Image (tube, coloured by chain):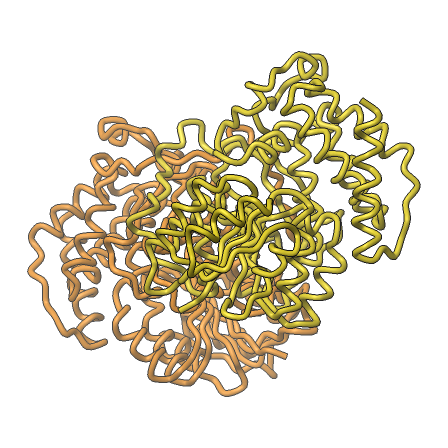
Chain colours: A orange, B yellow
């Protein structure tokens, strides 16, 4: 029986993870759950999965949950997340938090010796070096849940010492694929939230529309697979059937395909190296239903300038990815609140990165400070 | 240093295998070579690769080669092939023979404890049970070289005990994809020999045009991967980029892609589980050059009736695949000689299989007898 804690259990990944657990209760058990403010759903999850502990964002929510569920340990705030990430009766932590606030709980879980099912790319973007060092030191597994990184991970199974020539990181291209810069100027929030293939949280959906998501994934892939940036190629593939692939030095390309269903990578991370029989949950990929087949295009980096920003930030290293990510998190939030236009996200990011003076050898506190500073700066700019 | 013998060194696979060996002479050495009658090319290969032994079809060719190359052991005939397949100073035998005459040398090599690089599907079609039993008993490796089976094998690496839901065996569809039965009646030899993607020997090129090749590959896959027939799905994929794939029970599909270049699967079989750096030989797959993307269609079994014949023969087992294969070998030969029309190949096969009374528990002699009998019968029918 594997005991799993879920950070972010009321989000898109969290709820799908609970689906997987519910269908495989002979293998998995929920150790702890956490959410920010969606306590209504959290309470339903508590009743169904009977976790030993939960964590929420606010103290008042913690109190009312504790009053209702006497046998559940209830934590709150940043420390609450870290408490359930490192609690004793737990084997694996699914980090499906949104944004870089997943960094500290990830480190807490790794340092407590937990395996991590990882769906929180911002954490590796800002703290890749620290996290990967802790993972190596503690000898835990960091198992990717992002569909692309899971695809790469699956394509690397059995590869032994074989050298990688290239990672092919596929991208749907989002709702604005083929748009010109001018067209991007007048797109609406509603359009930006309408992702063609995947149903996801709003932050990642906007990141997909700006292509920043793919930029962040490049940085995530660099850390997860220890591959230089120039070996990671973004390939736009609108049908999202090939989830990503690896080319080896003999020219052979191994890729993972499937219907866009996050329960496949979630289940794989939970049960790795075994696969679960998801017979009742997942439909087989019907190659014949792919009306336009599978098509592939280069990313338009002149329009979606977030891609070059991400490569450049990763190349520079140090505080650069921290600043890019922190600024992006604030800008997406402002766009979601209707305070800026869609195109402003990348325009302001370009300005921010142009003027940023990189700092190096950041500790965890240094990262948090840099993140906090850039968020203030960006808020002031608007 | 791995010492490799090549059965069929002057054919398409054989010459490409020698290219791979020539480019990797620090790893591989040629132990022995064989050909049927192309002794001119064989002599050039002897001079370049200095094998200890060679085998040819006819005694007179053996004599003249022996006179010219005093330090080479020269064998001839069926026994000659078996002698070099089982010779002492050899680690691996590449079987790139054409047709079921590869059966006895394969068994000789396996029984002598050699690993096999396998590019001779007819041998498994007629003798799969015997060959696989010998492979298990001797603990040798049978490494597929056919591009589809290599793709499946590559997709199975690192799969551990994970259950297979389906094997997706891709097919280019050959030069007559989309043709009606009526159109097939008037196609020419020249058209049948013009394969859209692969440059191969004439027997396999005609088999690709009739789709019998895919039928034989289904049977080969069943034996190589120990998978029931109903889990092997033929998917027509005209671009031949996805060389085949495996769907696991979680719905995840792992596939192998690449340019159509047989040196990739040959090199993989030679150096498994390592991959060779084929940097100078193989171009990277350019996803962006796939103008029509990758498309997928069901096979038209009403037109290409060889497919159902192959599934049915494999389902019946015993002598059925032997008879189907033997009849097909003769019919392809006759078509190549202009004695029958293209459509006659499948029409006569249908007749042959309708009237065949299956025999079971065939020994190797029984298989050879059955093969010989059906060849005579088919020759008499025309």
Of A238 and B46, nearer the camera is B46
**Residue drawn at point x = 61 percent, y = 16 percent:** B188
User: Residue B356's image quarter?
Assistant: top right
In this picture, residue B164 sits left or right of residue A341:
right
Q: Position of residue A288 (x, y in %)?
A: 61, 34
**Residue drawn at point x = 71 percent, y = 60 percent:** B131
In this picture, residue A133 sits left or right of residue B361:
left
Image quadrant containing the C terminus of chain B:
top right
Q: Position of residue A40 (x, y in %)?
A: 55, 62
Of A104 and B41, nearer the camera is B41
Location of residue A281 with respect to B262 vertically, above or below: below
Q: Is residue A270 visible?
A: yes
In this picture, residue B283 sits left or right of residue A6:
left
Image quadrant containing the N terminus of chain B:
bottom left
Q: Is residue A257 visible?
A: no
For the image, the number of numbered tags is 0
Q: Position of residue B139 (x, y in %)?
A: 64, 72
Q: Position of residue B290 (x, y in %)?
A: 40, 32
**Residue drawn at point x = 32 percent, y = 80 percent:** A134
In this picture, residue B197 sits left or right of residue A284:
left
Location of residue A342 with respect to B140 vertically, above or below: above
Of B286 and A312, nearer the camera is B286
């Amino acid at each position: 029986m594997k005991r799993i804690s879920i950070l972010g259990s009321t989000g898109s990944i969290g709820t799908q993870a609970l689906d997987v657990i519910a269908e495989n209760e002979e293998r998995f058990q929920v150790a702890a759950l956490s959410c920010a403010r969606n306590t209504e759903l959290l309470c339903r999850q508590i009743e169904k999965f009977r976790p030993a502990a939960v964590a929420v964002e606010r103290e008042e929510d913690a109190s009312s949950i504790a009053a209702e569920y006497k046998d559940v340990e209830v934590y709150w705030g940043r420390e609450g997340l870290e408490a359930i990430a490192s609690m004793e009766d737990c084997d694996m932590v699914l980090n499906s938090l949104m944004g870089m606030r997943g960094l500290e709980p990830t480190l807490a879980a790794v340092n407590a010796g937990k395996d991590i099912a990882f769906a929180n790319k911002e954490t590796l973007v800002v703290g890749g070096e620290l996290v990967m060092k802790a993972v190596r030191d503690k000898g835990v597994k960091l198992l990717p849940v992002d569909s692309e990184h899971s695809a790469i991970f699956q394509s690397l199974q059995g590869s032994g010492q074989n050298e990688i020539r290239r990672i092919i990181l596929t991208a749907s291209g989002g709702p604005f694929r083929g748009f010109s810069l001018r067209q991007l100027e007048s797109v609406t929030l509603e359009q930006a939230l309408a992702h063609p293939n995947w149903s996801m949280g709003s932050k990642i959906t906007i990141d997909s529309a700006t292509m920043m998501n793919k930029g962040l994934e490049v940085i995530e892939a660099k850390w997860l697979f220890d591959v230089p940036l120039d070996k990671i190629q973004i390939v736009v593939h609108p049908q999202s059937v090939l989830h990503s692939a690896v080319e080896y030095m003999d020219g052979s390309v191994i890729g993972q395909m499937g219907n866009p269903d996050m329960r496949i990578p979630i289940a794989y991370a939970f049960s790795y190296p075994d696969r679960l029989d998801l017979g009742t949950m997942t439909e087989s990929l019907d190659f014949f239903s792919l009306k336009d087949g599978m098509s592939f295009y280069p990313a338009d980096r002149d329009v979606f300038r977030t891609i070059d920003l991400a490569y450049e930030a990763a190349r520079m290293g140090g505080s650069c990815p921290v600043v890019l990510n922190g600024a992006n998190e604030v800008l997406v939030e402002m766009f979601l609140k209707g305070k800026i236009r869609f195109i402003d996200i990348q325009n302001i990011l370009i300005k921010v990165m142009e003027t940023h003076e990189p700092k190096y050898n950041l500790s965890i506190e240094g990262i948090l400070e840099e993140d906090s500073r850039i968020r203030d700066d960006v808020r002031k700019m608007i």
